[in-house]
Amino acid sequence: MIAEGPCDGLTFVELAARLERDGVNPVHAAALFRHLHAGGAGEFEPPLKRWWEAKSAEIRTTMEVVKVTASADGWTSKRLLACGDGRQVEAVLMGFHGRLTACLSTQVGCAMGCVFCATGQMGFQRHLRPGEIVAQARVLSEVARARGQRIRNLVMMGMGEPLHNYDATMQALAVMTDTRGMNVGPGRVTISTVGHVPGIRKLARERAPYSLAVSLHAASDEERQALIPVNRRWPLAELLDACREYEAHKGRLFIAWTLVDGVNDSPDHARRLAELLRGLDVHINLIPLNPTTGFNGGTSRAARQSEFQKTLREAGFPVTFRQARGLDVAAGCGQLAAG
């Protein structure tokens, strides 16, 4: 059955089938797909033009820009977007050496409950539909085109746990990576998870070469549960097994570690992390804690950050600090939230 309603969450094949069902030759799907996802002119041939005029009010997912906040770094801007039901999410556009990256949300709120994350502090409200995920990218793509640029990278690191909303996330990515539309290379997509084990196992078998970033933050179940409550459901042993399965199918994965002062930033923590990851092909991204109003922990001091990195490097792991963007407008890792 071909879905009614907005078309921007449909893959190219589904869009062609939708047109055919409505009595329009599916050959016109290319022009419509390009218009929906790549800023096409919308000058359609008569059969598609009549269909468009009859259905234009329902073709696109409603996603209203409520507020735009630009960072003083000159590279980052955050948009508060309202869905058709009034629920709100945030999406971020970031520049790195002339390349634009879109950070997209997959849920309104989040059920994972990470204590230092503003989205986790909201609680879970609902999943986003594929068209609502795609619509965020469309909004940011329009900004990029106005600058004479286009989005090169997608990171599913905004509000929500992407693998908890697996089907909608994969559907949206299939749309956004299609060469007939937005044309973001699948190899330039990174999906972030706090350790949703069933989702990691499914992702390991996806044909598309999406990258995976696993937020670890602690090397023992007791310490991790204090930061990431969902660790009780999928403890470290299960999570590491899923990571090995992913590595066997896809190769290297990324490990994210948020450094919280006095909590997980000592050389001993680094040595235990190295032992936990021994034998896995990983790149470790260190993230100094970004402040949120709902968490009292402090950002690790610079000297401790450097020592942590040094300890991991001496253990043989590639390790870098993730570039901080938009912290002055709460657009950094763990800072996105909406009313």
Image (spheres, helix red, strand yellow):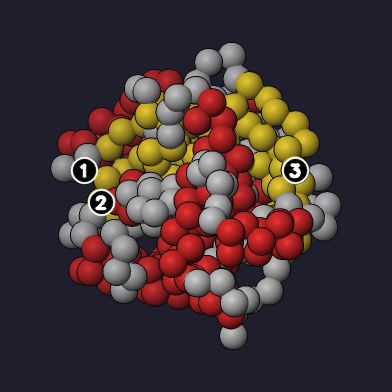
**Is label 2 in contact with label 1 (beta carbons under 8 Å)?**
yes
Residue type at tag 1: Phe
> For the point 33% across and 70% down, which residue is it?
206
> Which residue position holds label 3?
64
Residue 267's place in the image compared with 204, above or below, is above
For the point 47% across and 51% down, the residue is 34
**Residue type (three-letter) at the residue carrying disc 3:** Glu
Q: Mark 3 falls on what kind of element?
A: strand
Q: Which residue is mark 1?
A: 317
Q: Which of the two marks, 2 or 3, is nearer to us in this view?
A: 3
Marker disc for residue 282:
2
Residue found at x 37% / y 73%: 201
Kindly identify the amino acid type of the residue bearing the numbered disc 2: Val
Image location (x, y in percent) of residue 183: 38, 48
> For residue 279, which quarter of the picture?
bottom left
Please tell me whether residue 75 is drawn above or below residue 253 in the rendered image.
above
Q: CA distance from mark 3 to mark 1?
A: 43 Å
| Disc with the residue nearer the chain's start (2 vs 1) | 2
